[in-house]
Amino acid sequence: MSTLHTVNKSSFTHSTLKSCISVCANNDGILLLEDGVFSALQSAPDAEALITLNEKGVVIYASQDDIKARGLEHKIASHIQLTNYEGFVSLTLYHKCIQSWY
């Protein structure tokens, strides 16, 4: 059973993403929302861990609206897939379980 993990805290100031990463399994997805999109930066503290997860089959998404609201459009790591709210809904339908990390 795959899980969609939503993270809304920046890894620059919280350990929420690190906790999420520790329980992710193959075919899970991580959606970075709100200040969580700061974790999509190439320079983010957990950037290497996200690359490793992505190579193992965990897809990392980020809300394009939250990225745009924070002026980060040109600073996002290349393995991060941008999604809109329609895409968010599709992800919730695709994954069998949703886990929010706050």
Image (cartoon, rainbow, N blue to C red):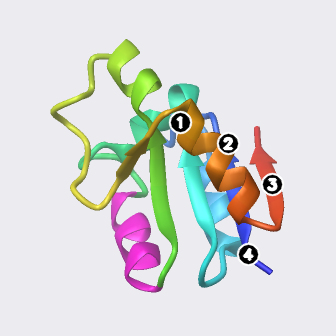
50 is within the stretch colored magenta: yes
* Marks 4 and 2, how far apart at CA: 15 Å
**Which x, y percent locates residue 57?**
48, 81
**Which x, y percent locates residue 37?**
45, 35
Residue, disc 1: 36
What is the three-letter code of the residue carrying label 3?
Gln
What is the three-letter code of the residue carrying label 1?
Gly
The dot on residue 89 is: 2
- Residue shown at the point (60%, 34%) measured from the top left: 9
- Residue shown at the point (60%, 79%) measured from the top left: 27
Which segment is the magenta one?
47-56
Task: Locate the N terminus and report the quarter of the image it occupies.
Answer: bottom right
Task: Locate the C terminus and report the quarter of the image it occupies.
Answer: top right
* Marks 3 and 1, how far apart at CA: 14 Å
Numbered disc 4: secondary structure: loop
Q: Is residue 81 visible?
A: yes
Q: In the rendered view, does 41 fall on the left or right side of 87?
A: left
Quarter where residue 7 is shown: top right
Image vertical order of residue 17 relative to residue 83, above or below: below
Residue, disc 3: 99
* Marks 3 and 2, how far apart at CA: 14 Å
Q: In the rendered view, does 23 fall on the left or right side of 47?
A: right
Q: Are marks 3 and 2 in contact (CB under 8 Å)?
A: no
Mark 2, Cα crowd under 10 Å, few <14 / some 14-19 / many 20+, is few
Mark 1 or mark 4: which comes first in sequence?
A: 4
Q: In the rendered view, does 81 fall on the left or right side of 84?
A: left
Mark 4 or mark 2: which comes first in sequence?
A: 4
Numbered disc 3: secondary structure: strand
Mark 2 or mark 1: which comes first in sequence?
A: 1
